[in-house]
């Protein structure tokens, strides 16, 4: 199983680098959020009680976290492409299980989401953000983002396991993306939210990933709790996705 998983995972990662358009979009989209949205609110940072006067420093962890949401959609689209072009059928006539295919897709898509991190860090440095992080802090932040990505990839893959329609990932993405983004603290502190929205934010995994990054970049927070929550998120959604895919993954 491990050799099958590694081979399929390597294929998913290599497909990213073989498609310059997808690679560029993966990096440019969050970069535009950071530059344009961050710059537009930069002058208001002092009024938002952010814990820093540099809004880019506050926004960066949120942008990296929300971008991990979109990579789940690409993972499910990759699965549908494999179904439509016959690759999935060829794989599943071998001893490779549907659960192994699911794990390779989830890990591969989450790894794709990490590609943008160096570019975003360089962009933030240009805007005057400093990173007083130790090696352990960097590892914890990256692992937290990986957990977040695995959870969202698992969610998308489970919801599209039985579909061969190109439109399904987009419909699912449109349904869950905006509520998850705007009920998190990636734009402003969730202390400014009304009580009902604050309750949603307090269980939103994007909030935990965002606060994990902010605890390293601008200080404060509870990184241990945030990382633990994200590990549970990845384990629970990964387990659900594995079971659903093993049972309902449709080849064509």
Image (cartoon, rainbow, N blue to C red):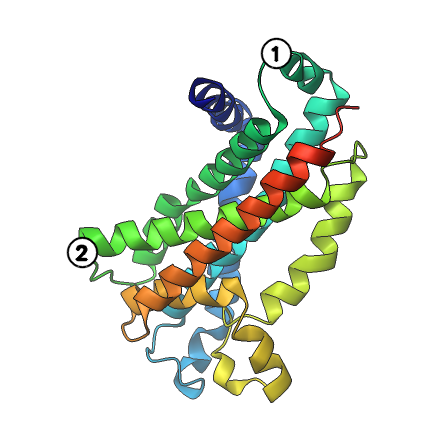
Residue 211 image-quadrant placement: bottom left
Residue 72 appears in the figure = yes
Quarter of the image with the C terminus in it:
top right
Q: Residue at x 36, y 67 (%)?
A: 225
Mark 2 lies on a secondary structure that is loop
In this figure, which residue is indicated by the disc labeled 1? 94
The one nearer the camera, 59 or 210, is 210
Decide: is 233 above or below 28.
below
Tell me: 189 left or right of 90: left
Q: Residue at x 33, y 49 (%)?
A: 122
Distance from Cα at disc 1 to Cα at disc 2: 45 Å
Residue 194 appears in the figure = no
Q: Residue at x 62, y 48 (%)?
A: 155
Q: Position of residue 188 (x, y in %)?
A: 49, 76
In this figure, which residue is indicated by the disc labeled 2? 134
Q: Are marks 1 and 2 in contact (CB under 8 Å)?
A: no
């Amino acid at each position: 199983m491990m050799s099958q998983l590694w081979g399929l995972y390597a294929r998913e990662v290599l497909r990213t680098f073989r498609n310059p358009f997808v690679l560029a979009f993966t990096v440019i989209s969050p970069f535009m959020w950071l530059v344009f949205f961050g710059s537009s609110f930069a002058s208001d940072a002092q009024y938002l009680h952010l814990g820093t006067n540099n809004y880019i420093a506050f926004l960066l962890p949120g942008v990296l976290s929300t971008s991990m949401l979109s990579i789940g959609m690409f993972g499910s689209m990759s699965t549908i492409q494999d179904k439509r072009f016959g690759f999935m059928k060829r794989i599943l006539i071998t001893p490779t299980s549907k659960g192994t295919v699911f794990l390779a897709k989830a890990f591969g898509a989450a790894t794709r989401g990490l590609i943008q991190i160096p570019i975003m860090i360089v962009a933030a440095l240009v805007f005057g953000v400093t990173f007083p992080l130790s090696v352990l802090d960097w590892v914890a932040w990256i692992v937290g983002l990986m957990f977040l990505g695995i959870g969202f990839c698992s969610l998308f893959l489970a919801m599209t396991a039985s579909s061969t329609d190109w439109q399904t990932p987009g419909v699912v993405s449109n349904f869950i993306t905006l509520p998850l983004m705007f009920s998190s603290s990636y734009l402003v502190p969730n202390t400014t939210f009304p009580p009902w929205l604050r309750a949603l934010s307090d269980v939103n995994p994007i909030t935990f990933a965002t606060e994990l990054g902010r605890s390293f970049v601008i200080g404060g927070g509870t990184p241990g709790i945030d990382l633990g929550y994200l590990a549970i998120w990845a384990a629970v959604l990964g387990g659900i996705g594995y079971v659903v895919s093993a049972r309902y993954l449709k080849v064509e």
